[in-house]
Image (cartoon, helix red, strand yellow):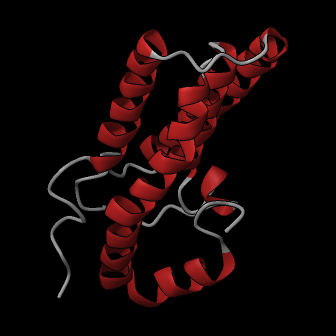
Amino acid sequence: MVEKSPNTLPWPPMIFGGLVIAGLLLQQVQPLKLTEALTWPGYAVLAAGIMLDIWAMATMTKSRTNILPHRAADKLVTSGPFAHMRNPIYVGNTIATLGLGLALQNGWLLIATPLAAIATHKLAVVREQAHLRSKFGEAWSDYAGKVRAWWII
């Protein structure tokens, strides 16, 4: 039986957004300052994460499939950044959060980054993969056997 949607809530933007807000607030209360030498490289990392997000969303839009993480997939997208990783938007969010932490010299955001990635994997990716496996069967299994979920894992 194909599940109608992988989740009832859009976990990834809630997780990343919530942890970024928490990191910014914590920095006001108990600063974890980084070196200023990381500011400009941080902006470059932030830009790279945003560009990956845009590339992935543009690829999904061009494929005429849903991009909302709590809605059912319309199509299995395997081109563009999806040829290199199964979750390029979440990888982009992770890279952007890391870059924001570096750019703002905010150590809390560096702590939040892996926490957001782990929470996103547990609350969204695992469920999305089950949904895609159920909906696309062998095509999903072939794709998942060739392309890593998070690029490095």
In this rendering, the answer to whether 63 lies above or below 48 is below
In this rendering, the answer to whether 99 lies above or below 12 is above
How many marks the image carries: the answer is: 0
Q: Residue 84, percent across and down?
A: 70, 60
In this rendering, the answer to whether 20 lies above or below 123 is above
Of the 4 image quadrants, the one containing the N terminus is bottom left
Q: Residue 113, percent across and down?
A: 55, 41
Q: Residue drawn at (50%, 38%), measured in percent from left and top?
A: 112
The quarter of the displayed image where residue 100 is located: top right
Q: Residue drawn at (19%, 64%), measured in percent from left and top?
A: 5
Q: Residue 26, percent across and down?
A: 42, 21
Identify which residue, 137 or 126, lies in the foreground: 126
Identify which residue, 149 or 39, lies in the foreground: 39
The quarter of the displayed image where residue 135 is located: bottom left
Q: Is residue 16 left or right of residue 151?
A: left
In this rendering, the answer to whether 152 lies above or below 3 is above
Residue 58 seen anywhere in this rendered image of the structure: no
Q: Residue drawn at (34%, 78%), measured in percent from left and top?
A: 130
Q: Is residue 8 left or right of residue 123?
A: left
Q: Residue furthest right?
A: 37
Identify which residue, 55 or 92, lies in the foreground: 92
Q: Residue 63, percent across and down?
A: 46, 51
Residue 145 seen anywhere in this rendered image of the structure: yes
Of the 4 image quadrants, the one containing the C terminus is bottom right
Q: Residue drawn at (38%, 48%), measured in percent from left and top?
A: 64
